[in-house]
Image (tube, rainbow, N blue to C red):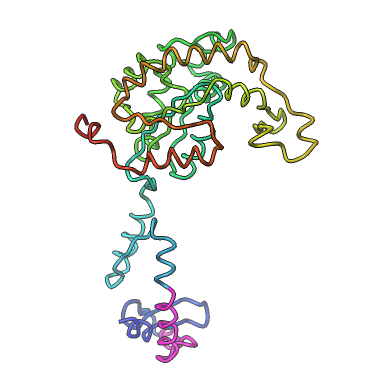
């Protein structure tokens, strides 16, 4: 079939247009008369090229197996084109075995932001951060953003009546629904967890990032921000690459010991109720390790089958 197709190929030397004696023959006799057979299109040439293709194609397919689509091209070219267009127009599927709805629960300084970013990058899911949603709403001066702004400026707790609609709107967007999401910063207590489920956004993976308070203190007190680029650094895990950057780093004003211990105490007072609530799908991860090891632990919980107790309740 390939030899037969290639044998009918013709080229117009005047403009480089390609024609075929069977499938796409020009109507004008003047064009027909000047068409020529392309160079290196003898049967022997085509046979050598086909051998080279067959020698390497399996390795190429193996490299792109996650995104490969086989299409039968022995049909009209319009049908082939429509099948290709349909495939490339579809939203990309996540590499995860399920549509991930991942919840990261951990105290301040446990590394939720770092792990959420890594998960979103590897599995092509949406990284949903409540703090980022709040800042975006305020910057864009949305209705919710304007209502949240006074609380944000006073650094006081933002009511659930403002946070929940903001979060539900984001989780309900097409990218979150089709690709999945990883959420951190919410819920902070059992009531918020119940609200999330009532609105149809129950997670199918929940990771509790366990870390001792003393380790949190060490992490946070060594955490710095570059005021020029916005990059975050940690003197132990992710030090600045140059002395120039090191000299201009600053720390967040509320990263002091008293404030951090207060936040840790609030977290542990609430988390035990969420552990009970998510007992069927909750997975405890030792977050007092380097970020790569923590990521591997989380990833193993994603690729493993959904617990039977969760499937029975779904």
How many dots with numbers?
0
Q: Residue furthest left?
A: 312
Q: Position of residue 49 (x, y in %)?
A: 44, 83
**Residue 69, percent across and down?**
34, 60
Residue ID at (32%, 20%): 276
Q: Would you say residue 148 sits in the magenta stretch?
A: no
Give whichever of 75, 196 is nearer the camera.
196
Task: Decide whether the magenta segment is chiefly helix, strand or loop.
Answer: helix
x and y, in percent, of residue 169 in the image: 39, 25
Taking 185 as reference, is 29 left or right? left
- Residue at the spot 39% in from the left edge and 78% down from the top edge: 54
Q: Could you tell me which residue is drawn at 40 percent across and 85 percent down?
A: 32
In the rendered image of this protein, does residue 69 appear above or below residue 293?
A: below
- Is residue 39 found inside the magenta-colored segment of the image? yes
Figure quadrant of the C terminus? top left
50 up-or-down from 309: above or below: below
Quadrant in which the N terminus is drawn: bottom left
Q: Residue at x 50, y 29 (%)?
A: 112
> Is 7 placed above or below 112 here?
below
The foreground one among 19 and 210 is: 210
Query: Of residues 265 and 125, which is closer to you in this image?
Result: 265
The quadrant holding residue 57 is: bottom left
**Magenta span of residues:** 30-56
Q: Is residue 222 above or below residue 85?
A: above
Residue 309 position, x and y percent, is: 23, 31
**Camera-side residue: 163 or 289?**
289
Q: Quadrant of residue 74?
A: bottom left
Residue 243 is left or right of residue 186, and the answer is right
């Amino acid at each position: 079939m390939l030899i037969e197709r290639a044998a009918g190929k013709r080229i117009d030397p005047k403009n480089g247009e390609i024609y075929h004696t069977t499938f796409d023959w020009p109507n004008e006799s003047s064009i027909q008369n000047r068409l020529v057979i392309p160079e290196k299109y003898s049967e022997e040439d085509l046979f050598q090229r086909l051998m080279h293709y067959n020698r390497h194609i399996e390795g190429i397919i193996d490299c792109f197996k996650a995104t490969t689509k086989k299409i039968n091209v022995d049909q009209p070219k319009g049908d082939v084109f429509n099948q290709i267009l349909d495939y490339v127009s579809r939203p990309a599927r996540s590499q995860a075995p399920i549509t991930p709805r991942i919840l990261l629960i951990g105290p301040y300084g446990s590394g939720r932001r770092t792990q959420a970013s890594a998960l979103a990058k590897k599995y092509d899911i949406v990284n949903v951060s409540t703090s980022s949603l709040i800042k975006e709403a305020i910057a864009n001066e949305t209705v919710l953003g304007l209502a949240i702004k006074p609380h944000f400026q006073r650094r006081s707790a933002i009511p659930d009546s403002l946070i929940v609609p903001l979060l539900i709107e984001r989780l309900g967007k097409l990218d979150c629904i089709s690709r999945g999401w990883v959420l951190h910063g919410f819920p902070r207590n059992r009531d918020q967890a119940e609200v999330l489920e009532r609105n149809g956004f129950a997670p199918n993976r929940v990771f509790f990032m366990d870390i001792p308070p003393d380790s949190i203190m060490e992490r946070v007190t060594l955490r710095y921000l570059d005021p020029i680029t916005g990059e975050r650094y940690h003197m132990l895990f992710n030090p600045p690459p140059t002395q120039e950057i090191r000299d201009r780093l600053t720390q967040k004003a509320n990263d002091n010991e008293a404030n951090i211990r207060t936040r840790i105490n609030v977290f542990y007072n609430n988390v035990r109720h969420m552990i009970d609530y998510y007992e069927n799908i909750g997975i405890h991860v030792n977050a007092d390790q380097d970020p790569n090891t923590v990521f591997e632990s989380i990833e193993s919980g994603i690729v493993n089958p959904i617990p039977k107790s969760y499937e029975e309740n779904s």
